[in-house]
Amino acid sequence: MKAGLKPIPFYKTEITDGFWKERQRINREVTLYAVRDRFKETGRFDAFRCDWKEGDPNKPHFFWDSDIAKWIEGVANVCRRHPDPELIRECDEVIDLIVKNQGEDGYFNIYFTVIAPERRFLDRDKHELYCAGHLFEAAVAYYEATGKRKLLDAMCRYADYIEKRFKTDRDTGFKTSGHEEIELALFRLYECTGEQRYFDLAEFFINERGPDDVPLSPTSALAYNQSHLPVRRQREAVGHAVRATYLYSAMADLCAYTEDPELFEACDELFDSITKRRMYVTGGIGSSASGEALTRDYDLPNILSYSESCAGMGLIFFALRMLSLNPDSKYADVIERVMYNNLLSSTSIDGKSFFYTNPLETIPYLYYKDNITEYYKIKYPKPTRSQVFKTSCCPSNIVRVISSMENLIWGEDGERLYIHQFISAETTVTRDGRDVRVTMRTDYPKSGRVEISVSGAPLKLAVRIPYFVKGNYGKTQHGYALLTLQDGESTVFEFDMTPRIVEARDEVLFAACKCCVMRGPVVYCSEAIDNGEGIRNTLLDLTTKIEEDYTGNYHSPVLRAEGWRRSTPNDAPLYSDGVSPLRKVELTLIPYYAFANRGESEMSVWLRYKM
Amino acid sequence: MKAGLKPIPFYKTEITDGFWKERQRINREVTLYAVRDRFKETGRFDAFRCDWKEGDPNKPHFFWDSDIAKWIEGVANVCRRHPDPELIRECDEVIDLIVKNQGEDGYFNIYFTVIAPERRFLDRDKHELYCAGHLFEAAVAYYEATGKRKLLDAMCRYADYIEKRFKTDRDTGFKTSGHEEIELALFRLYECTGEQRYFDLAEFFINERGPDDVPLSPTSALAYNQSHLPVRRQREAVGHAVRATYLYSAMADLCAYTEDPELFEACDELFDSITKRRMYVTGGIGSSASGEALTRDYDLPNILSYSESCAGMGLIFFALRMLSLNPDSKYADVIERVMYNNLLSSTSIDGKSFFYTNPLETIPYLYYKDNITEYYKIKYPKPTRSQVFKTSCCPSNIVRVISSMENLIWGEDGERLYIHQFISAETTVTRDGRDVRVTMRTDYPKSGRVEISVSGAPLKLAVRIPYFVKGNYGKTQHGYALLTLQDGESTVFEFDMTPRIVEARDEVLFAACKCCVMRGPVVYCSEAIDNGEGIRNTLLDLTTKIEEDYTGNYHSPVLRAEGWRRSTPNDAPLYSDGVSPLRKVELTLIPYYAFANRGESEMSVWLRYKM
C-alpha cells in the first residue's frame, strides 16, 4: 500500500453539461432552500440561540448542530461557483450565534448547553463529538469558500478544548466518539490549518477506539459503533452503517499519511466486507432498520431493506479515500453504483423531498398500519419521500455531497490523471510547470460515449473501464485503461450501455430466482403505476429483447420488456388446486433513481423471470 | 342458525387402528411423561406447594397453574381407557396442594399467592382468570374420568368467589379476562354440575367484554385481547391468536344454548375472517411473532411465520363448536387441515419435543445470531423442537388434545350421524331405544379408502366429502354426503389422494409464484437433508408426475418429483450479469408434519416451480 492519488479539489473542476449539471442546479436552486426552510420551520436554526426553555416548542435534539453544519457546508460548496450574499448572510448569522454561545473554554453544543449542561462529555450515545466533527467540516469549507475565519477560529478553540479533555486530561465519561465523524473532520481541520495537533488528535481517536471504551447503552453491542476491536483488527464491517463508513473513512485518511500497511489491510478488507457481501445492487448498505445497521453476509432483504441515504454517502466517502490510497477501479465502480442509484433515489426529481431509507421493494399498503395492527413490530419502509424527518441527517448531507460531486470525477498521482467517473467536466492540471486543460464530454449514463481531450501539453491518462463492459481497451492497470494524449488530442470511449440482466449470488435469499435489469450503472425497477399492482406475480421474459424508449424525461431511457403475469380469480379461495396460467404483458421499467416520483406506487428492483 | 349437532363424548368412541391410534399411543406412553418430567425439573409441580421465597430457584410464573391443569386434563383423558393408579396418585398430590393452599374465600392462584398477593384481580395482563379456567376444565375432566370430586368442589368454590368479585361486588381492577379461557371453562363447569350460575357467569364475561375494560398495557391495543368491541360487533379476527380462538369458542358455546342469531353471525364471520384470509395452508394461524397475533388479511409470511401450536388447537376448538352449531363441511375441513399439519408438526415423531411456533420455512443459520447481530430485532423461527419452554403452554395442551382426538370424529343431530374425520374408530349411538354400533375402517390419510358399517339398526349418515376431492357423491348437504345404512350394511368411500399442486391467492405475498404440494389433507415440504441447501433456488417441475414412495415411515408416502436447481459459481461476485442455468434434480418431499425429525435442516412448504 502506498498513498497513490491526490484528489483534485472539487472547486477546480467545472461540471459543464449533462446529467449532473442538472442535478447540481436543482440541488442549488431548490434543495438547498427546501432544506433550509424545513430546518427553520422545525426550529433548528433558532436552536443556535441557545435560549430554549422547558415548555418552549421545538426542543433541540442532540444532533441538530450537525444538521445545520452540513447545510453550511453545502452553502460553502455552492458559493464557490455561485456566490450568494444572502446565503452567506444566513450562515454568518448562525456563526455569530455559535461564537456568542461558545463557552470560554471553547465548548459548543446546543443540546449540552440548554438541555443537559451537567452531562457534558459523559454520554457517549449523544452525538456530541459527531456534532463537533460536522461543525469542523463546515468551518473548513466555509473558510475555504469565503475566506471568513470566524467559524474556523471558533472551531479550532473547540478542537483544542476537546484535545484537552479527551487526550490531555482524560477526564471524560468515554474515550472515543459514540458516533464517528470527528476523526475524519479533524483531518480536514489539520489540512486547512496545518496544525499537527489536529492530525494527532484524529490519530488518537482512531487508535484509542476499542473494547475498553463504554458501550452506548446496556443493550447495544460494542460492535454497534465499531468499538468491539482495535481498528487494525477489524475485518468485518458491522454495526450502524453510517458510523462504520465514517470511521473507515477516517482510517483511510490516516493511512494516506502514515502508509500503515496493517491499517490499509484492515480498510481494504472492511471495504470488501461491505461491497462483496453486504451491499445492495443499488449501492445501499445497512440492511437492518433495527440499528440502521450492517448485519451479516448476504443479509439483504428487499421489502424490509433499510439502506439509509447517509450510509450510501458514507460508502462514497470511504471508497473515494480508498481510491486515493490504491487506484483500483473496484472503488470507483462502487462509487458509481451508489451515485446512480442509492444516492440519486434519496431525493425526488423536483429536489424537495427525501428518502431516509431507500428500499429495494415497496408495497405501500404494508406501510400503513391501522389501529389494530400498529403495535406489531415489523416496520415496512415508507413508500414515499418526506420533506423533513425528526432525525433529518440525510437532506443536508445530500446538499453538501451533490454540491461537491466534482470530487468524484478524477484524481492524479503527479504523473497520470485518473478519470474515475464520466461526467461532462473540465479541469486544469499542472505538468512540468505548464497548465494542461482536460475536457470530458459525455451524456453518460444515457450514452456510453465519452470524449476526453487535452490541451496545453501532453498528458498521461488512466480511464476507468466500468465493471459492466467487456472488450479490449489496450493496456490496463487495476481496471484503468492507460493512454497518453498529446497536446490538442482527443480520444473517445464507447462503453456498451445495452440493458443487461443481473443476478445475485445464491446466498442472497431475497433475490433467489430473481433478476434485476441494469443499463450501464443504472439499476431499473418496476413500478405498479406502469405495470399494475402485484409485481411479485409478474415475470420478466428473458427470451425477448429489452427495448429502450427515450420519450420519457429521466435522462436514461425507460425500458420496455415482455413479461408474464399470473393472477388468481377474484373469487378464488385462499388456497386452490393448480397454478394460475400466465398471460403475456408488456412491462415498463424505469430507473430506480426515479421511483416514487409519480405518487405512491408498489415497486420492486428484483423481478421474477421466465427463461 | 340452530344448534345442530350434539358431540359424542370422546370416551364413547374408541380409535381402533391406524394413524391416530399410534399418535395417541405415543402421546400416552411418551409425551405425557416427557411433559411431566420437564415440568417437574422446572419447578412447576413444586410451585403448587405455594412456599416459594425470594432467592429460591424456579420462581413461579403467572401461568404455571394452567400448564399443570392441562396436564391433569390429559391424564384424565388418558385414564378413561387406560387407567393408571400412579398417574392418578400424582394428580391427587397436586390436587391436595391446591385444596391446602386455596383461600378460605375459594381463591387459588400460585403467583398471586406467593409473589404478588396484594395484586389479586388487579392486573388484567397476568392470566389469573385464564389459570382459573384451565383449573376448571381440569377439575371437570378429572371428576368425569375418576369420579373424584375434590378438585371439582374446590374449583366450584373458586368459581363462586370469582362470581362474587367480578359479577356481584364488581370490585376488581378489570372486568373481563386478560387472556380468555375462563369463559369456555365455565360452560364445562355448568355442563358438569348443572349449576346455572356458572352458565350465567360465562355469559356475563362474554357480554361484558368490550372497550370499557382496561387495556392490558399502555402500549397494547384493546384489540390485542379482543376487547375493542362488544363481541357481537366483532367481525374481523384480531389480536393474540390463542386468546381470539378461546373467546370465539366460548361465544359459539353460548350460541349453542341461546341460538342468538347475532352472536352466530359474529362467530361465523370471525371464522371466515380467520380461515378465508388469515390462515396458513397448514392451518396455522397468528402470523406475527410480535404479539403472537393475527394481523391483517393475507399477511402470511413464511420465514417469519409464527403459527403457534396452541393457536392451531384453539382453531380446532372453535371450528368444532361451529360445526355443532351448523353442520357444514367448511368447519370440519379446517379441523382436518390443522390436525394433519399444524397440530402434528407441533410434536416430534418420538413424542418428546415440541414446536411452540410452526414455521412454513426455516433456514437454520438465520436463527443463530452471533454476538454482533443479536440485538437486531427480527426473530427468525427456531428450526428445531424443544423439550420445554419458558412459556410452555403448548406441550400440555397437546397432551390433552391428542388424548381426546375422538371428539373430532363425529357428531349427531338426533336423526343423523355426521362423520367429520376419517379415523378407524367405533362408537355406539342410540336410535329408537336401540344401540347402533358404527364402525369406521380406514388407513386415511395414507389411503383414501373409508369403510363405514352399521349394526343393530338402520342409521342415517352424513359423511364429509373432503374439500380436495371431486366427483359425484349422490345427495349432499353443506358438503356432507347423505345416506342411510341398513342394519349390517357397509359402504365404502374412495377419496382420491393423488398428490396435487396448490397455490395461494395473489394477495399472499410470500407465496407469490410458488406452489405447495398436498396429498389429501397433508401438506408436503422440501427439506435440505433430502434436497440440499438452498431450497429457494430449487424449482418444482410441474410438467412431470409426482411419484409416491411408501418405503419411508411417515405413514403417508414420501413424494418424488422432478425439479430444477440454479446455483451461482463459488467464485461469483455478489452481482453478476446473466442468470445461472437450471440443472435437473430429483426432489424428495416429506409430509410437513414430519419435518425437523432428522436433525436441523432448511425447510420450505412453498416451492418455486417451473411450468
Image (cartoon, coloured by chain):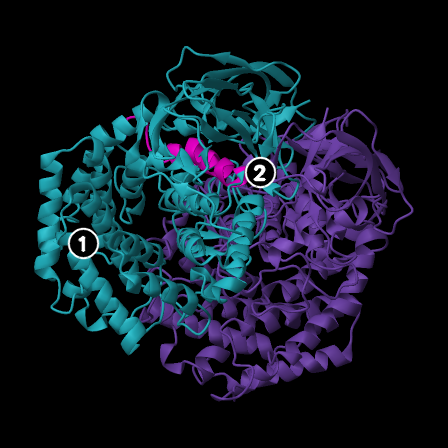
Chain colours: A purple, B cyan
Tell me the tag on residue B420: none
Q: Could you say which is closer to the camera, residue B598 or residue A78?
A: B598
Using residue A19 as the reference point, say whether residue B532 is left or right of it: left
Do discs 1 and 2 belong to a common subunit? yes
Magenta stretch holds residue A383? no
Q: Quadrant of residue A561?
A: top right
Above or below for A192 versus A522: below
Residue found 43% across the figure and 40% down from its top: B414
Q: Position of residue A307 (x, y in %)?
A: 59, 51
Is residue B56 visible in this depiction of the protein? no
Question: Residue A576's quadrant in the figure?
Answer: top right
Q: Amino acid at mark 2?
A: His
Is B574 situated above or below A57? above
Which residue is at the front of the view, A139 or B502? Answer: B502
How far is the residue under mark 1 from the one under mark 2?
39 Å
Asked if residue B347 lies in the magenta stretch, the reply is: yes
| Residue drawn at point x = 50 percent, y = 26 percent | B484
What element does badge 1 sit on? helix
Q: Which residue is mark 2?
A: B478
Percent x, y of residue B100: 7, 59
Q: Which residue range is magenta in the image? A: B329-351
Residue of label 1: B152
Callout 1 touching callout 2 (CB < 8 Å): no
In the displayed structure, would residue A416 be above or below residue B202?
Answer: above
Which chain is mark 1 on? B
Q: Residues within 10 Å of mark 2 (few under 14, many from 20)?
A: few
Which one is earlier in the sequence, the residue at label 1 or at label 2? 1
Q: Main secondary structure of the magenta part?
A: helix
**Mark closer to the observer (1, 2):** 2
Residue B413 in percent (x, y) is at 45, 41
Q: In the shown orientation, is residue B281 left or right of residue B576?
A: left
